[in-house]
Image: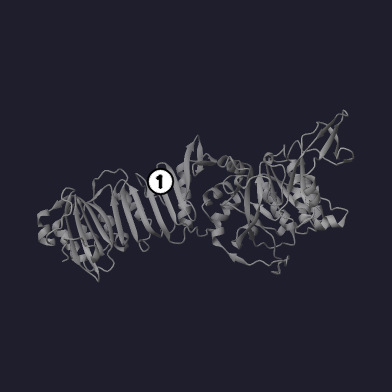
Amino acid sequence: MDRYTVRDITKYEMTLVATNNQNQKIKVIPEILKEQLNEACRYVNVVAIANVLPGMTKLEISDGTTSMEVPFKSPRLRAPSPVIICISPQFIAEQWQTFIAHVHVARRFGGHLHLYVTSMIDSFFDLLTEYEKLGYVTVDFWIRHDIPEVNEESELRNQAGAQTDCLLQYKEAAEFVAFFDLDDILFPVHQNDYLNEFRMLYSIHPDILTFHYNKRETIAHNKAVISDINFFDLFNHTWFVNEEDYGKTVTRPEHLKSMWIHEPFNIPYSRKHTIKDNHLVHIQKPVDSDGKETIPWRLSNFERIEGMRKNETVLILRKVSRDLRNFIDDTEPDLKLSLISVTFDPLLIWLKSTGEPMEIGYQKVDDGCQLNVDRHSMTFLENVHPKDIFLDDLNMLLRLQKSILPYFEMSAHRMTSDILMTKNKLRVKKLLIKTSNPHDAMKMLQYTCPMTIEEFGIYDIKMSNEAWKMDEIMASGHWKKAKKFENLEFNLDASVLQLTHFDMVNVHVKEVSAEELLELKKHYLNSPDFSYFYIGYQKLLNPHRLPEFLGPPLILHPDHHDNGRWYFKCRLSECLYIQHFGTNVFMSSIDREMVPKGGILQ
């Protein structure tokens, strides 16, 4: 409709007159909706919404005096699939290879293409009709107007009208409708198929009306012969344009009354949700075998973006899509995660690359394993034990983490010798082990590379406060290489002098002596990289000799377990600070200006 007519029509009441097969008539005043991005085009998509008669045979538009008949068609009562993908009109279409890629991916994940045709080359149309016979696609026709001005002034050949037409056709027949271009291909990342993927999204976001997928353009090579098309060639690489483009929409059809090209404008933006962990694979400008782009407009600058190959959803993606699972196993890219945290009771894996961490849980249900992501059920695997799937995923994660992992944590009451089955030792900077004894802690330690360890900690998962002998661990390369160590909920049965190669220490010990504290003071007094040394002890030997070794203490709070403070000149403007409080001793480097009144700087 002419936009000026749209402007004027809002001042008056449009009347629709419906007649049914029993010659009954009803007059209704419809709701008028306009789907338009801006005022650039004269002719815009306008939808009139009203309830009419069952068995309607004639529809007219009237101003009260004059009537004009309006052609119409009835909506579909059944859909070929619960998920319909509405493809915008094809105009002078020739990229049949893109159709082949899209129609097979859609079929694989339970979608059905409803494709509009304005014009295309004969051979492409012949191919299209063959796929329609197979039930892969529904071909519909989108006409051009007889008046050239209308075609020239319609917004992108009235794609919004076609998308609205598709919405209304399946409004009562399909569970979900997606509005894509032919070169926009979606792979589900959480479920086996589109249907359960979209159901999951609506279960997580019940107040959302539409979900929006942005596009990521990827490189694709055309094949001249259909038998040469290879889906691994199309999708198993990482050549993308390093930017996201304005994407497309998925919705339940009952949520919308009209549709624009990319998104509807007649619902609040607060009820639209942009998907962050997935995107449409956009095959916009395929490359011919000679390396030239077949579409020279806005030539693309492709880059190898390894992060596009893997993200936090890799485990779920691997579980639910056989083709992509094979791709993951065959290519083995670097995940570049920043955190992996594992616990055996319950079976959980936390992982993080960017954004918020993701939790993957493995729960035994009947004779299979229920996979949960962030406490939401994702997929069910039959005839498998959760622990087997858990260990398989854990070892896959560690195998694919080829770069140095910043942080790895494992929590298990008992660790078996074959808990990790990676080909290479895990390279990690910070390692935290939570277990019930030092022998099991050593089992975990043997799976990690000592050369990359910068800090590690060991916690007693039973919180027993027992004494642990860690001779095997203290002889390891990890112990010698790291610069930071901490233990918690148990007491180390060893001399604190065996920890002097660390720059940062938080240790709980069975006992420590005044003589050992003196040696620590001598060692760290001029150590250039020293940060702190905290000791929590069960027993202090020879406490009466501390004033002899360290000098007279400064006691600021005699009623609060304050056993004294000492200050010793060290490098430049700093001093070594020692505090004895309760059953704890703390040493660190501080500025000399921080020495309180009454403190003696020795």
Relative image position of residue 428 (x, y in whole percent): 40, 59
Type of residue at label 1?
Answer: Thr
Relative to 199, residue 283 above or below: below
Residue 192: x, y in percent?
60, 44
How packed mark 1 is, by other alpha carbons closer than 10 Å (few <14, some 14-19, many 20 or more), is: some
Q: Nearer the viewer, residue 145 or 597?
A: 597
Q: How is the image coloured?
A: one colour
Q: Is residue 115 left or right of residue 255?
A: right
Determine the residue positioned at 49% across, 56% down: 354
Left or right: residue 20 versus residue 491 is right
- Residue at the image position 55 percent from the left and 57 percent from the top: 330
Q: Looking at the image, how many numbered discs can be counted on the residues? A: 1
Relative vertical location of residue 424 with respect to residue 187 in this rendering, above or below: below
- In the picture, residue 602 is in which quadrant? bottom left
Percent x, y for residue 431? 36, 55
Q: Is residue 131 above or below residue 298?
A: above
Left or right of 111? Residue 415 is left
Q: Give the percent coordinates (x, y) of residue 142.
A: 81, 50
**In this view of the protein, which residue sits in the foreground, 330 or 426?**
426
* Residue tagged 1: 343
Q: Residue at x 43, y 43 (%)?
A: 347
User: Which secondary structure lies at badge 1?
Assistant: strand
